[in-house]
């Protein structure tokens, strides 16, 4: 049987969204005006005009962390890094004021945080080697860590539109610069030779968007950094 990766907090790892997400409303505070990380875990949000909110509806809170630009391809904008705060379930609606229980809390939920459609991912992934041609790059690291990067989260610039699925295993390559041919240094024009990129680790895709993916470093033998290439 293929190996299975268990990751209980795939939701918490975030993702890159190409454009701003649809907002259902914005967090105001919790019902008793006490800190949002206290008990009971209840919050109040204000729904956007025209939204139909009913008791039992589930949503997910999130934050826009930063704009993501490509580190290799002329720094083009890839989208926004989204950090999910938690999943909520509405239990009372008063006009546009909605009260909800916090079902799962991944990160701190703050006043003004947007509320979007409920998102759900499995907590177990069947590991499958990805065998199609693919040239991707690590465009961001969640914690900015390099050495000892195992189990750390990275974001790459390819996604479901390129055939990637959660559980796919990929190889991380260190881009080695080309060298001058040592046997032709006497020539007036130096001749460059291409070197072979070095395999430095593997990663597992946790979740995908159309043109990006969130992944976890599974193994690494050298430092992993933004700009490293990813492929089969």
Image (cartoon, helix red, strand yellow):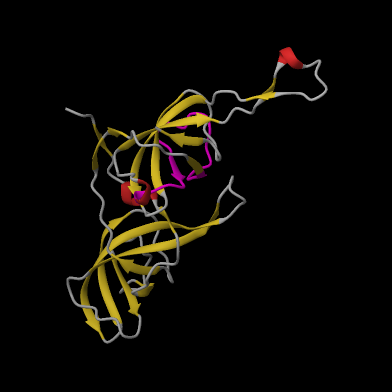
One can see residue 119 in this view? yes
Give the percent coordinates (x, y) of residue 35: 38, 65
Q: Residue, x 37% and y 72% (percent of image)?
A: 23
Give the percent coordinates (x, y) of residue 136: 47, 41
Image quadrant where one finds the N terminus: top left
State left or right for residue 10 relative to residue 228. Answer: left
Per the rendered image, the range of residues in magenta is 139-160
Give the percent coordinates (x, y) of residue 112: 44, 71
Q: Residue, x 31% and y 46% (percent of image)?
A: 9
Name the image quarter holding residue 176: top right
Image quadrant where one finds the C terminus: top left
Give the percent coordinates (x, y) of residue 39: 28, 62
Magenta region, main secondary structure: loop
Depth check: 143 or 40 in front? 143
Q: Residue, x 28% and y 78% (percent of image)?
A: 98
One can see residue 39 in this view? no
């Amino acid at each position: 049987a293929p190996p299975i990766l268990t990751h209980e907090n795939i939701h918490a790892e975030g993702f890159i969204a190409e454009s701003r997400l649809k907002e259902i409303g914005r967090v105001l505070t919790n019902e008793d005006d006490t800190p949002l990380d206290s008990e009971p875990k209840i919050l109040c949000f204000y729904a956007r005009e025209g939204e139909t909110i009913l008791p039992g509806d589930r949503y997910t809170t999130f934050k826009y962390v930063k704009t993501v630009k490509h580190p290799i391809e002329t720094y083009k904008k890839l989208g926004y890094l989204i950090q999910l705060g938690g999943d909520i379930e509405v239990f009372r609606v008063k006009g546009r004021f909605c009260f909800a229980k916090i079902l799962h809390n991944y990160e701190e939920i703050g006043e003004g945080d947007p509320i979007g459609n409920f998102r759900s991912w499995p907590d177990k992934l069947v590991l499958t080697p990805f065998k199609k041609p693919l040239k991707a790059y690590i465009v961001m690291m969640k914690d900015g860590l390099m050495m000892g990067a195992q189990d750390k989260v990275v974001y790459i610039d390819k996604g479901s539109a390129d055939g990637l699925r959660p559980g796919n295993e990929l190889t991380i390559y260190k881009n080695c610069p080309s060298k001058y041919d040592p046997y032709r240094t006497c020539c007036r024009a130096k001749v460059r030779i291409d070197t072979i990129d070095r395999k430095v680790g593997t990663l597992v895709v946790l979740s995908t968007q159309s043109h990006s993916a969130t992944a976890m470093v599974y193994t690494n033998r050298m430092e992993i950094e933004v700009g490293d290439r990813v492929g089969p």
